[in-house]
Amino acid sequence: MKFHPNIVTIPLLLAVLPVCADDSLSLADATARALGRHPSLQVFDAEMRLADAKIITALTRPNPELEFETEDVLGSGVYEGFDSAIYNLGISQLIELGGKRRFRGELAKSAREAEDLRFESARREIIADTARRFVLALAAQDAEASAEQNRKIALETVRSVKGLQEGGRGSALDVGQSELGFKEAELLVENARSRMALAHQQLASMWREAKPDFTRVSGRLTEPVASVPTIESLRASIEDHPVMALARSGIDTAKRERALQEKLRQPDLNLGLAWRRDTTVDDNAVVLNFSLPLPLWNRNEGGIAEAEAEISRNEALVEQTRQQLVAALGEALTKLEFARASYALIAGEMLSQAAKQQENVAEGYRLGRIGYLDLLEARRALTGVRGQKIEALSTYHEARIEVEALTGKSL
């Protein structure tokens, strides 16, 4: 099973709605940068070239051997010196029987296919991680916008309180409290901007960028879907995950290893051809020889047993991997449903109630019916609900990314 390195295999680009801006970064651009420059993918080029080289090595025939030997020399009597020497010059070739070279090649090709699957698995995780960080960057921008809106309300409150004081209906204490509340709102804006800058930096680190070359990310987080799919409806999609394919490839590799080990029980033939020169009679001759190991004590039972044990181990790993992915999918769906329900409650009821309450309290304060502390508390409550809305939507999309990464399906 092979994967093209330029095909996005999970529909994470649907997680946000695009918004064009000159100085902003889109999710598609961020994903392309991460896939092109992420350090964990750089090593796969060398790994794949190494696997290709191992295929060539596995399919290469053994080299012939050149042999030379001299007999009956440097002895005593008639064997003194080289006058009685016999020279043998020959060549031998190992003939592998039983198709061992072909089985070695298949085993090496299986390892190469496993590298493709490892690459695709790492690539999918990088796409998902980039999307997660992009979502966090969008959420940080929303939080910064909410903090800025809160600062504007605090500034309007300061002006209102000062106006009431000038009209004789406010106190210097309220003015001081409102100015302190405004400083608090400004601090929240600065904190939100710092978190946004950190989110941008974490996103840029996906492509080894020391300093982000963008000031904003484009898009907005979409509203949650009406309902969350069940784990039963998505469970079959787990089987298409690259990690599952990689686990299954381990079984195929182990079976090919067993087939090779079974073939290794068959001995190989070594054929030789030599030229013989006997100086004692001044004659030449041809020498033919062959050798064939006798499989009496070692029939490779150990190698076959190891391969069979490896098959059993990989079968267990497939089931373990499946259960881990199913458990991860269940957790992601649970988080997705919780975030969806939380967002529905916050956006549907709590936010409108908090906004209405803040308006009513502000009006009551202008009429002198409500104290400033109540006004400050209402504004803080509205700010808190807005933050909860952003957090719930961010959590929802993080869980959505996890589900899509596990299943390869768009929600």
Image (tube, rainbow, N blue to C red):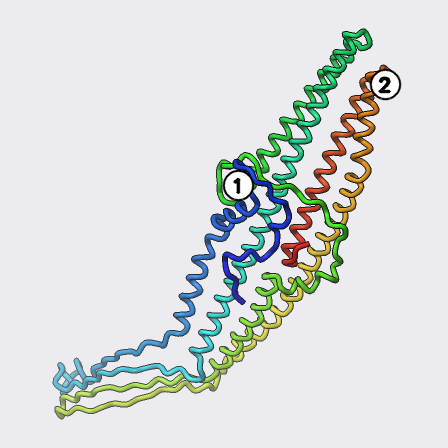
Mark 1 element type? helix
Q: Amino acid at mark 2?
A: Ile
- State yes or no: discs 2 and 1 in contact (Cβ < 8 Å): no
121 relative to 296, above or below: above
Mark 2 element type? loop
Please give the residue where the numbered disc 1 appears in the rendered image.
204
Residue 114, image x and y in percent?
52, 65
- Answer with left or right where residue 183 lies relative to residue 62: right
Residue 154, image x and y in percent?
72, 21
Q: Residue at x 82, y 29 (%)?
A: 356
Query: Residue at the front extreme?
Result: 20
Foreground residue among 311 and 87: 311
Question: Label 1 crowding class (10 Å Cα cut-off): few <14, some 14-19, many 20+?
Answer: many
Distance between mark 2 and mark 1 Cα atoms = 48 Å
308 relative to 141, above or below: below
286 relative to 319, above or below: below
Foreground residue among 157 and 91: 157
Q: Residue at x 82, y 33 (%)?
A: 353
- Answer with left or right where residue 307 lies relative to residue 292: right
Q: Residue at x 61, y 41 (%)?
A: 219
Q: Is residue 129 visible?
A: yes
Please give the residue where the numbered disc 2 appears in the rendered image.
370
In what quadrant of the picture does the C terminus appear?
bottom right
Q: First in sequence, mark 2 or 1: give its number.
A: 1
